[in-house]
Amino acid sequence: MSDRPPLEMEGFRAEAEAVWDAIPDHFRDGAILLIHPEAEPDPEYESVFFLGACESAFGPLEDALAASGDYRPGDRQSVLHIWFGSFVEMAARAVDFDWPYELEETILHELTHHWEHRAGLDGLDRFDAAQLTNFRRLRGQAVPMYFWRDGEPWAGGRWHIDGDVFVEVDGPPPWTVRAEDGETVTAEPDPMDGWATLYERGAIFDGRRGDLIVAPRPPDRSGPLRRLGRWLRGLFGAAPAAHTDEGEPG
């Protein structure tokens, strides 16, 4: 368990303001931080609480500008919300909840949303959606194959979401892979899901070890020019191109 002091609103607000003030001014440009005393539950899952959120400060105006063709993402103004009550709820449920660390991570996460939206990017939005999809998986709900590719990319064709590690492999099952605890394991796919779930063989997150999910790598759908290039490299013995974690030329 963490030796951090219990959460109290006064100390929480002071910690949040200290984190915010420590961020250089130019990184806070166009964003303000609001601390709310209440909790913010997910409308779909009452046991899940939002720690923070980033929303447009002038949503209707931005919608009107977009409709007129004059929307400029670089001018976006954002409000960052942090919910103290959600931290209280999570601290009560977690095995080891370091709330000052989680507070800093949440503020930086929501501020990154602000800058991604200004740049017209959506990487964190996709990651947040992957987290929610993985939560549905953990609840036994049907989820789409390869949703984890919007998670945190790791080396070796792996992705990470809150302790759960997803690895894609080549060839028919059974698949032999290295678990995150260092051991070699063999996996067979579930005929309903198409992937294999090895419980508590993933990464350590919040004091517990997550799952290891093993799935077949999707077919190579490279275009004809890329396939021709690979054929020519093989024909003339050229050195292969550098590869990314996903197995595609970098």
Image: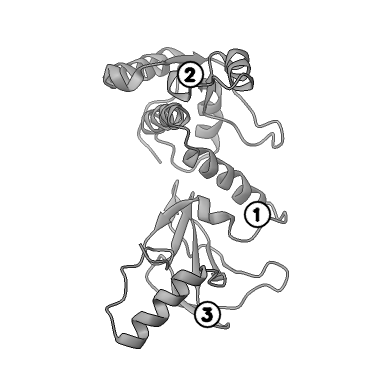
In the rendered image, residue 182, in percent from the top left (x then y), is placed at 37, 70
**Element under disc 1:** helix
Q: Earlier in the sequence, mark 1 or mark 3?
A: 1
- Residue 175, numbered circle: 3
**Element under disc 2:** strand
Please report contact status of discs 3 and 2: CB closer than 8 Å, yes or no.
no
**Looking at the picture, which amino acid does disc 1 mark?**
Arg
Name the residue located 41 percent from the left edge and 41 percent from the top edge.
Answer: 1
Q: CA distance from mark 3 to mark 2?
A: 46 Å
**Residue on which the image places disc 1:** 137
Residue 163 makes an appearance in the image: no
141 sits left or right of 187 in the view: right
Q: Residues within 10 Å of mark 3 (few under 14, many from 20)?
A: some
- For residue 104, which quarter of the picture? top left
Of 85 and 79, nearer the camera is 79
**Looking at the picture, which amino acid does disc 3 mark?**
Trp
**Element under disc 3:** strand
